[in-house]
Amino acid sequence: MIGDFDGDHIKKCVVIVVPHTSWHDFYMGLLVRQVAGVKISFMGKKELFKWPFGWYFKKVGGIPLDRTSGQNKVEAIAKEFKKREELRLTLAPEGTRKKVSSWKTGFYYIAKTANVPIVMVAFNFGQKKIQISSAFYPTDDIEKDIKFMYDFFKGVKGKVPEYSFEPED
């Protein structure tokens, strides 16, 4: 289940989880990282970190993100990697729990700017398994890299199968 992901060796990385089809993905992620024994953080809009659940989200590794427009969020998040000795940051490149045919690319530019690898995690509810990739370092060819990552998630079915990620050809 844990694949090649070795949290003791990879101290900093962007972890992308696809498909993101349900709120169940959150507690599944918490469970997986507990079983793996790897500290993995996540970012959420700062509004989530207020009462009544803010204390809980911080306790389980949440980092509040100010999503006010006009900010360079990629640069701000990349700085978080520079400030910390250890940061494995989970992001959902789909940006929503609804069906999409392409990803937002912020995760890619965060990894490039912070000079950290990307680890891909698939919650494959269709096959009842979790797939975890080896660390992947983005190159300077975003189209090739995105295609490589899309291929990792090919055929993966989320908790809500009709919202599962299927890239446009």
Image (cartoon, rainbow, N blue to C red):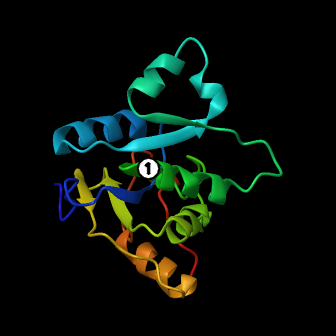
Looking at the rendering, in which quadrant would you find the N terminus?
bottom left
Q: Residue furthest right?
A: 70
Residue named by callout 1: 90
Q: Is residue 66 above or below residue 164?
A: above
Q: How many marks?
A: 1
Q: Residue at x 73, y 56 (%)?
A: 72
- Residue 133: name its quadrant: bottom left
- Residue 29: name its quadrant: top left
Residue 132 spot, x, y in % from top left: 26, 61
Image-based side of 60 in relation to 144, left or right: left
Residue 7 spot, x, y in % from top left: 23, 53
Image-based side of 89 in relation to 54, left or right: left
The amino acid on which the numbered mark 1 sits, given as a three-letter code, is: Thr
Q: Residue at x 51, y 64 (%)?
A: 114
Pick the front one: 109 or 12 = 12
Q: Is residue 89 above or below residue 47?
A: below
Q: Residue at x 26, y 42 (%)?
A: 33
Tag 1 secondary structure: strand
Near mark 1 (Cα within 10 A), the count class, few <14, some 14-19 or many ≥20, is many
Residue 48 spot, x, y in % from top left: 60, 26
Pick the front one: 168 or 49 = 49
Residue 122 in sight from this viewpoint: yes
Residue 162 in sight from this viewpoint: no
Residue 76 spot, x, y in % from top left: 64, 52
Image-based side of 134 in relation to 3, left or right: right
Q: Residue at x 58, y 68 (%)?
A: 109
Pick the front one: 31 or 153 = 31
Q: Is residue 143 above or below residue 14?
A: below
Looking at the rendering, in which quadrant would you find the C terminus?
bottom right
